[in-house]
Image (cartoon, rainbow, N blue to C red):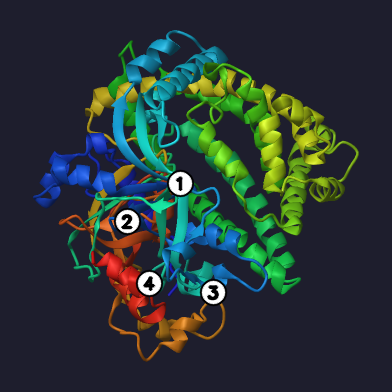
Amino acid sequence: MTRFLSLSAVSALALAAVLPASQARADEGMWTFDNFPEELMEKEYGWAPDQAWLDRVQASAVRLTGGCSASFVSDAGLILTNHHCVASCLFDNSKDGQDYLNDGYIADKRDLELKCPGQQAEVVTKITDVTGDVKAAMGTLTGEALTKARDAKIADIESAGCTDTATTRCQVVTLFGGGQYKLYTYRKYSDVRLVWAPEDRAATFGGDPDNFNFPRYSLDASFLRAYENGKPVKTPNHLKWNPRAPKEGEVTFVVGNPGSTSRLYTSSQIAFEREVRLPITIATMSELRGRVIRAMEESPEHAREGLDLLNGIENSLKVYLGRQKALNDPGFTAALVAKEDELKAKSAGNAAIGDPWASVDEATTAYRALYLPYRFLSPSSDLFSYAETLVYAAQERAKPNAERLPGYTDSALPLTKKRLLDEAPVYNWLDELRLEWSLSKAREYLGVDDADSKLLLGKESPEQLAKRLVEGSKLADPAYRQQLWDGGLAAIEASDDPMIQYALKLAPRQRELQKQVDEVYSGPLAVAGGKLADARFAAYGDTLYPDATFTLRISYGKVEGWVERGQQVPIATTLGGTFDRATGNPPFDVAPAFAANKDKIDPAVTYDFVTTNDIIGGNSGSPVIDKAGTVIGAAFDGNINSLGGNYGYDGSVNRTVVVSTAAVQEALETIYPAPALVKELAGK
């Protein structure tokens, strides 16, 4: 049955939020690998992994730059992740009459494995604390001067750390809102190919109604492979494939790259989320969803071409609705305030800390005045994104590395270039729809007479401008993008492409807004964030976990259900349950291969299961690992109660939803046969 975020669930979360930051609840935490809480886990479970265990797992964990997590599961670069993490690859390789997203894909031989545009696989090889260097560069500077000095030092550190940008990537990560800075060094693989993926309906059975709910019946799993110099990479460090059912109560670890959390936000930042960002995001995204659904009904081609975008919109929309519901609960927000007040009380009288909360309040108030133009001055469109990247790259590459904007430094440019130049389809109707939508929302929120609204539209309507820019642009052609990239700023300024000229027109105002945001918001927050981190460390010690930053983390928990509305939710579902849940009508229509092989499928095989692990978006595809260090599943979702987890964790109801390796093995052997893959996973 469909489960909603009940008041009792929110109240339980509120109770969790008032616990002191030093007393992380059992199973709470997205921990960095250089600060895993062995003593805390040992106290809760009577066992914790040693450093050798952690090192092996870290070397097997993969970050996919498309926004997901994954893991190596063979010695030949084979990568396990979620189906929804490869959906764009399936979509980009499809064409009329060949719909891989709908039909799935199986590469019988390695030379049939499909390249995934824009995708890169990265493995952390080292984590280095560079807090002292970055803070020394910031010194006593403030505002925009501070952000420039900080970014310049970060660019220098990244450049010095990775001189071989062909195979390595360096990224300085801000933790605790500016309390720490860590250099993450990655071994990167820029050639990632699709190996195996089931039909879309197998992964999305239940669709939006079942999303963020449990029980689930989803085969949200797929395989990629990393290549280098045209050959599969050798990956002796990989997780052992273990296609077994989970055991209730057993210890589990989720290793991946949670995207972003806001658990360290102050009250004024939370208020901004509740009063400004979330309402605008939900309203505008809801309208986009409706526009896309209407357009997809126009033809079978539109239905195919819009599916990947629609799936992403619906998933994101549900996340934002869950967050809004949590922040609109008075008990929950009161608990967050109580937690903040406790830290203030513990920090009172500490002159070195001062009052960073007042600084955050002032910065957030200033940001409110800039938020609308800052948000809407970069319209939504693949073609515009290409144009904007080309314009900024040409302008920034002419500067010394330390003076460039983040994303255009020497360490970041290879990935920026790859995403720009990799071949991927652009569907004009869909790009025009998105651009028209974003321009109309800009005019609606900024106002017709606003200077930024006039800059965006001139005398044209959103519909006219979107049509003219999209139909007149040549940027869908990667060869033309390459030509402009190679030609630099001179070629950009000489281009007659209307989208390029539009990006050139908007760039000065975008830069002006960024400068203002750095001066009144980003700069002050960097200083205040450092002070708040000092306050937490002084009050609760250094065994704390930072907010998520799409960098490698590990969480521990166990296989366990929960009580919802007085009923015990089971830990797992079975493959046979899919047919019991099916109605024959979308989205509860069984995938064709499931229907065709119903008599062959073992109905008792564990399909999806739940754990208490603490995760967030970005953890999709993360391996779920047992005590022995073997992979028994891939995390693909959270339950509906976990949506408030952006702001706090409650182990009594927050759950990670996992597709079991047992179900994937059954699919590989019976439903979507891939004998070579079965053999590889067995280590033969």
Residue 54 image position (x, y, % from top left)? 20, 44
Tag 3 residue: 103
Going from N to C along the chain, the mark reached first, 3 or 1, is 3
Q: CA distance from mark 3 to mark 1?
A: 46 Å
Pointer 2 with pointer 1, Cβ within 8 A: no
Tag 4 residue: 215
User: Is 46 on the left-hand or right-hand side of 650?
Assistant: left
Residue 355 image position (x, y, % from top left)? 41, 17
- Label 3 crowd (10 A; few <14 / some 14-19 / many >=20): some
Tag 1 residue: 330
Q: Nearer the viewer, residue 144 or 69?
A: 69
Q: CA distance from mark 3 to mark 4?
A: 25 Å
Residue 570 visible in the current orientation: no
Residue type beneath disc 4: Pro
Q: CA distance from mark 2 to mark 1?
A: 52 Å
User: Is 517 on the left-hand or right-hand side of 542?
Assistant: right
Q: CA distance from mark 2 to mark 4?
A: 35 Å
Q: CA distance from mark 2 to mark 3?
A: 26 Å
Identify the image quadrant of residue 453.
Answer: top right
